[in-house]
Amino acid sequence: MYTTVQFVHSWWAYLVLFMLVIATINGIAGMATKREYGPKDFRIALFTLIVTHIQLLIGLVLYFISPLGLSSITNNGMGTVMKDSMLRLYAVEHPLIMILTIVFVTIGYSRHKKKLTSRPKFKALAIFYAIGLILMLSRIPWQQWFD
């Protein structure tokens, strides 16, 4: 079960990264060109929100069944985990930063829905999705993606 969930989590991450990049670029482009916010923009923002939340659920399952997640902390102790950069990345940094990423995406989506005109909608999406993207890029375990 662990390897299946890990596989799904790893491959779904490509979709999440792709959608977050597209949604961020769409928000910045919409704000810069002063175009009207349309149904396509709404679908991009919503789909990005959905795929990130699905990734959160998959990630939470993985965190509890992975030997590098919660069991790493319970077996080794927090002191040992914090001294080992690989264990710290998988047990603490990656989960925390990815949850923050999803929080920023959710805030951006919520704020953009409350705006009545196009420019503030795009601005909310651009700012919060960009922050989420930067956070996400900072804690992806790149060495695992490219091995």
Image (cartoon, rainbow, N blue to C red):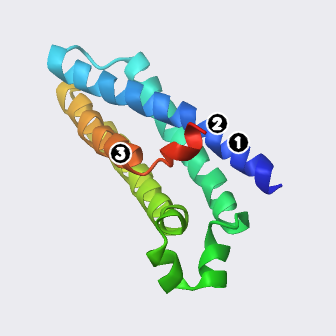
Q: CA distance from mark 3 to mark 1?
A: 21 Å
Residue 20: x percent and y percent?
A: 42, 33
52 sits to left or right of 129: right
Residue lying at 79% horizontally and 47% vertically, measured from the top left:
4
Element carrying mark 2: helix
Residue type at mark 3 is Gly
Does residue 114 show up? yes
Label 1, on which residue? Answer: 8
Label 3, on which residue? Answer: 132
Label 2, on which residue? Answer: 11
Does residue 34 show up? no
Q: Residues within 10 Å of mark 3 (few under 14, many from 20)?
A: many
50 sits to left or right of 112: right
Q: Nearer the viewer, residue 59 or 38?
A: 59
Do tag 2 and tag 1 residues touch (Cβ < 8 Å)?
yes
Residue type at mark 2 is Trp
Q: Nearer the viewer, residue 64 or 81?
A: 81
Q: CA distance from mark 3 to mark 2?
A: 19 Å
Image quadrant holding the C terminus, namely top right
Asked where in the image residue 54 lies, by quadrant, the reply is top right
Q: Nearer the viewer, residue 89 or 21?
A: 89
Residue 28: x percent and y percent?
A: 24, 25
Q: Residues within 10 Å of mark 1 (few under 14, many from 20)?
A: some
